[in-house]
Image (cartoon, helix red, strand yellow):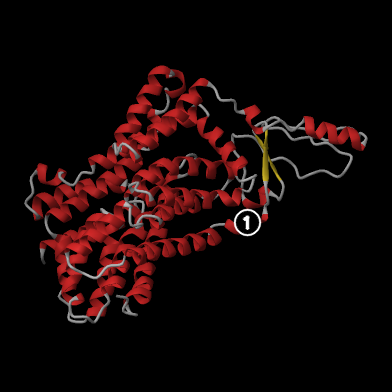
Amino acid sequence: MSPELISILVLAVVFVIATTRSINMGALAFAAAFAVGTLVADLDADGIFAGFPGDLFVVLVGVTYLFAIARSNGTTDWLVHASVRLVRGRVALIPWVMFALTGALTAIGAVSPAAVAIVAPIALSFAARYGISPLLMGAMVVHGAQGGGFSPISIYGSIVNGIVEREKLPGNEVTLFLASLIVNLVIAAVVFVVCGGLRLWRQGSVTEVDGSVEGLGGLEGAGGALKGRGELRDQPQPTGTVTTAAAPGTHPSPSPTPSPTTTATATREATPAPTSSLPLTPPRIATLLSLVALVVAVLVLDLDAGLTAITLAVVLSAIWPDDSRKAVGEIAWPTVLLICGVLTYIGVLDEMGTITWAGEGVGGIGVPLLAAVLLCYIGAIVSAFASSVGIMGALIPLAVPFLAQGEIGAVGMVAALAVSATVVDVSPFSTNGALVLAAAPDVDRERFFRQLMVYGGIVVAVVPAVVWLLMVVPGWG
């Protein structure tokens, strides 16, 4: 049995053990990296640790540390209130706002993980407050980032177009951008419907009153119990009855029946502006400025998102230690172990040539259309665990020999490879999926991890075949 095949089988065993036993998959992957790297690939410790994702480690720790402080001092709650006002209480619009925001950030040049690192913690905090599926919100953020990720001025778009030019292949920047945008938009719409988005539309608008939420269309029906953040208010009462705000843990009770004029006046007086319950305190102002500084540092100054976030978090901790005392403990350490362990093992596979071995085996197939769909699947599977840019850089040159035969259109093939290698970034083992998993507050992380893994598996299984059928088989370019 070849070393490459052994390494793939060991990865499968790691998955089986992790899903049948209560063992962190990252810890298993570290052990597997040590065993395979030492016994099969003849690597020393330096060779094994060459695949350790130090940059991703710092991003996960830094971003979750900063947003743990933001949750502790109430900044994320303030942002949630502001978001509700922005969309006039239409909670169903918020996932689409997050999709558009991350798409705009990547389209103008942000690296996809940086955009997700900025938006995901806010989006997932909103989801936790309003009982929105974290899978829905996380998927909207990631697919938004990938939807804008191939604009002609984006990082991904520039890299892929550069590879195409270097390999002297026909290219079309607009087609590449639109292909990714449309595919991610369609997937986002499907996820929105499947994960409860229609219920959000039916529940109508909500208004926030003294930290409580008043549903104008039945928020309870969407499963939106707001634990620890105020209670759902009763439905609007018949004319002549005033529902007064209730403290958490109690139920509102009707007051004696006043005249209609008194009712209207009392209702206005009992409904203060949402900002009255969440004032902008100095710690919140400083945290908001820190988030703005993070955006500027990443998008304008091209600084590392993880190092910038952890620096800002340390500054806030030094000034307001009481607000951030528990923040370090809220860093998603199990997620950090999981992601770093799995990616270290993938790094061992890369060091020993397993990924190249699989790609070359597919490239040698004599049937171009079959080779094309297999390359799309390899791109999707490997990218679910590793760098999307790296796998595109490896697979596009592998497609050159059969693209030169003229039986397959180069424009469609490049677009299919690009989409297949990036749309799977919802996987919890990819950088974007890991950021979503780490950023979700007040969730059962093991359950959320399984949801992301199943969803990522569905995307890996379905999307490459669909984009191959729509983009490669017709022979674009």
Observer-nearest of 207 and 471: 471
Q: What is the total number of numbered labels drawn onto the structure image?
A: 1
* Crowdedness near tag 1: few (<14), some (14–19) or many (≥20) residues, C-alpha within 10 Å: some
Residue under the image location 55 percent in, 48 percent down: 94
Observer-nearest of 18 and 131: 131
Residue 70 horizontal side relative to residue 77, left or right: left
Observer-nearest of 51 and 159: 159
With respect to residue 170, does 253 lie above or below? Answer: above
Q: Quadrant of residue 276?
A: top right
Residue 403 horizontal side relative to residue 137, left or right: left
Q: Which residue is mark 1?
A: 199
Can you give x and y, in whole percent of width and height, for residue 351 in the image?
13, 53
Residue under the image location 79 percent in, 44 percent down: 236
Can you give x and y, in whole percent of width and height, for residue 96 in the image?
52, 53
Can you give x and y, in whole percent of width and height, for residue 80 in the image?
56, 38
Q: Could one spot residue 372 in this view of the protein?
A: yes
Q: Looking at the figure, which quarter contains the C terminus?
A: bottom left
Observer-nearest of 259 and 334: 259
Residue 259 horizontal side relative to residue 472, left or right: right
Q: Quadrant of residue 405?
A: bottom left
Q: Could one spot residue 6 in this view of the protein?
A: no
With respect to residue 173, does 293 lie above or below? Answer: above
Q: Amino acid at mark 1?
A: Arg
Can you give x and y, in whole percent of width and height, for residue 462 in the image?
39, 69
Residue under the image location 78 percent in, 29 percent down: 269
Q: Looking at the figure, which quarter contains the N terminus?
A: bottom left
Residue under the image location 34 percent in, 58 percent down: 150
Helix or strand or loop: what does disc 1 sit on? helix
